[in-house]
Amino acid sequence: MSDTHFTHTQDQLKQLARDVLGYAKAQGGTDCAVEISEGSGLSVSVRKSQIETIEQNKDKGMGVTVFIGQRRGNASTSDFSPAALKATVEAAYNIARFTADDDCAGLADEDQLELHPRDLELFYPWSIATAEAVALAQRAEAAAFAVDPRITNSEGAGVHVQQSHFVSANSRGFIGGYPFSRHTLSVAPIAGKGKHMQRDDWYSSVRDAAKMSSPEAIGRYAAERALARLNARSIDTRTCPVLFEAPLAAGLLGAFVQATSGGALYRKSTFLLDSLGKQVLPQHVQIHEDPHIVGAVGSAPFDEEGVRTVKRDVVKDGVVQGYFLSTYSARKLGMKTTGNAGGSHNLSLTSSLTTEADDFAGMLRKMGTGLLVTELMGSGTNYVTGDYSRGAAGYWVENGVIQYPVEEITIAGNMKDMLAQIVAVGNDVLVRGTKSTGSILIENMVVAGS
């Protein structure tokens, strides 16, 4: 793909990376890893049709890790001159000299490196002028105001455009990189007046701007969400089924990833310790990772260490098949890296029980009577014990029909129980970052209200 949008070409970044590896070897390092990147972007925000901010960014950087045996040092610079690169390598080397040996430190093994990375088509530059970006944001906000006179205010609308590229390399023969892009349009309208105001938001975030939802569709939907929350009330404390709307259900998947990540596992700070090969979700639930979906936000041919990424079942029939490990965390656990240095890649949570009838309305009917959660507040998950308590807002549902909006409540449980009590997963699938899932129905949680 073209890299004419940048100051340096991919070939130039690769040569700089080779130079850094050479400097590290000359300095006396036994191994070295380097990443060099540059990018540019545009961010605009408007509020009540008036421009609030216009920001343009253009940045570059080089980060290097130098190993002396099993001691390591890190340093970085934004200056690509030979003198600056040499000085940065020297700084990393000197840090390594004075650190302690770590028997798990070091580069990934050669046979794990991706030496022939495929092109996953992750770069879709958007040559949008500032005035055009402002106009898009204004259209989204205007569409929200046009829905209903009760949309009285706005927290604003924004457009964010980013295109970058990078090269990673190490002294064991790996060198690879590619350009990538990420573009977002968002709006956050406010409904009502005085003490009875409610806000909500919606956004579209894509690699290819041609696939972005229209500003009118984003604005209308955000307004409808805000309006639906008017006249919210609290409810009495109770135990009931809870349906997590798809955007929040992705957060449950994120919690599972965190609990099965190498750092938490080797520190023994997770409620899913030693869960490999064990049933932690119902038999109907599957979690699959596919890093190689062309054009997807979570795609990558290799991870941050140059290790090849692979398609795999993370959970099959409710049983954990694999963790999320970097080279270091894998060695701490006596295992092999899973190619997840830097995080997960295109995770999808599905259920073998999901049918065409399990759209959003179908999931409400399946729940019958209970709480639909559409907003969570705070970070109330204890990953050591699994205890979960979050401020929440949403809707009370009876006989599969939304009755009224609710607020000023707390939902509580234990993540281990919540994962085990997934009753159903909707077909209303939404992609949020590197994760995709439909709405998720939990059998029972405590809902604390008035």
Image: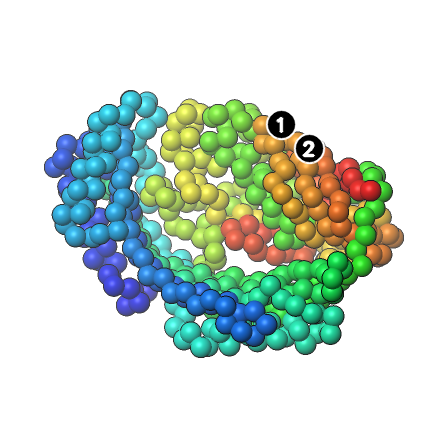
What is the distance, in whole Å, between disc 1 and disc 2 at their CAs?
8 Å
What residue do we see at 27% from left, 40% from top?
75
* Element type at mark 2: strand
Q: How many marks?
A: 2
Is residue 104 found left or right of 374 in the rendered image? Answer: left
Is residue 285 found left or right of 448 in the rendered image? Answer: left
Residue 119 image offset from top left, x and y in percent = 36, 58
* Element type at mark 1: loop
Query: Which quadrant of the rendered structure holds the N terminus?
Result: bottom left
Residue 115 in view of the camera: no
Identified by mark 2, the residue type is Asn
- The vertical placement of 159 against 178, above or below, is below
Instruction: Give the quarter of the image for residue 190.
Output: bottom right
- The vertical placement of 1 against 254, above or below, is below
Q: Which residue is mark 1?
A: 385
Label 2 near label 1: C-beta < 8 Å? yes
Q: Residues within 10 Å of mark 2 (few under 14, many from 20)?
A: some
Residue 419 image offset from top left, x and y in percent = 67, 37
Identified by mark 1, the residue type is Thr
- The vertical placement of 9 against 30, above or below, is below
Residue 9 image offset from top left, x and y in percent = 24, 61
Is residue 154 found left or right of 132 in the rendered image? Answer: right
Q: In the image as oriented, which residue stretches furthest toward the right?
A: 399
Q: Residues within 10 Å of mark 1 (few under 14, many from 20)?
A: some
What residue do we see at 35% from left, 54% from top?
118
Q: Which residue is mark 2?
A: 414
What residue do we see at 50% from left, 30% from top?
264
Residue 1 in view of the camera: yes
For the residue pair 82 and 56, the one nearer the viewer reads as 56
Q: Which mark is residue 284?
A: none
Specify which label sits upstream in the sequence, 1 or 2: 1
